[in-house]
Amino acid sequence: ANGYYYSRWNKCVHSSRDFSDMVFIDNYIFNKDVYIQFNSTVGEYVGYTEHGVFNAKNWNNNPGQLQQERAELERYCKYNAEIKQSAIADKS
């Protein structure tokens, strides 16, 4: 009970059927507060605490890491959304 809490949550958000408005968000959380976030609309990491700003600066200067995170919109979000949408559409 008396300890530190770290988690990383990512999510895909969209409201259109063609996924044209889809956004990939990757949150890094410490003690229930987001301290750094990648948002595919922004295209880079944003820090919300001193430690988050420090990491965001370093991670944004790493082309490989940034490229991998940017690719998640297609690789993870759209790929899985298409599978789920076809499964639902085939049932109706």
Image (cartoon, rainbow, N blue to C red):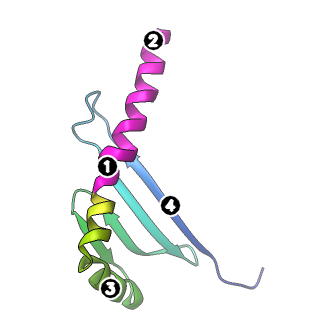
**Which amino acid does the dot numbered 3 rest on?**
Val
Residue that badge 2 annotates:
90
Q: Does the magenta stretch include residue 90?
A: yes
Amino acid type of the residue tagged 4 in the rendering: Trp
Residue 81 highlighted magenta (yes or no): yes
Q: Which of marks 4 and 1 is nearer the N terminus?
A: 4
Magenta residues, as a range? 71-92
As measured in the structure, the alpha-carbon distance from the residue carrying label 4 to the one carrying label 1 is 14 Å
Q: Which of 54 and 35 is in front in this view?
A: 54
How far apart are labels 3 and 2 at the CA level? 45 Å
Give whichever of discs 4 and 3 has the lower sequence position.
4
Which of the numbered marks, if any, corresponds to residue 53?
A: 3
- Residue at 48% over, 20% down: 87
Q: Distance between the residues labelled 3 and 1?
A: 23 Å
Q: Position of residue 33 (x, y in %)?
A: 50, 75
Determine whether the residue tagged by mark 1 lies in a helix, strand or loop: helix
Residue underneath mark 1: 73
Task: Determine the main secondary structure of the stretch shown in magenta.
Answer: helix
Eye-nearest disc, 4 or 1: 1
> Which residue is label 4 attached to?
9
Task: Point out residue 65 in the picture as x, y percentages from the top left corner.
Answer: 32, 70
Is disc 4 in contact with disc 2, using a CB cutoff of under 8 Å? Answer: no
Instruction: Looking at the image, tell me whether mark 3 or mark 1 is earlier in sequence order.
Output: 3
Question: Considering only order in the chain, which callout, 2 or 1, is on the residue closer to the N terminus?
Answer: 1
Crowd around label 3: few <14 · some 14–19 · many ≥20 (10 Å): some
**Residue 55 visible in the shown view:** yes
Residue at x 45% of width, y 57% of height: 10
Q: Is mark 3 on a helix, strand or loop?
A: helix
Q: Is residue 11 above or below residue 7?
A: above
Crowd class of label 4 (few under 14; some 14 to 19; many from 20; radius 10 Å) = few
Query: Which of the two discs, 3 and 2, labels the residue nearer the N terminus?
Result: 3
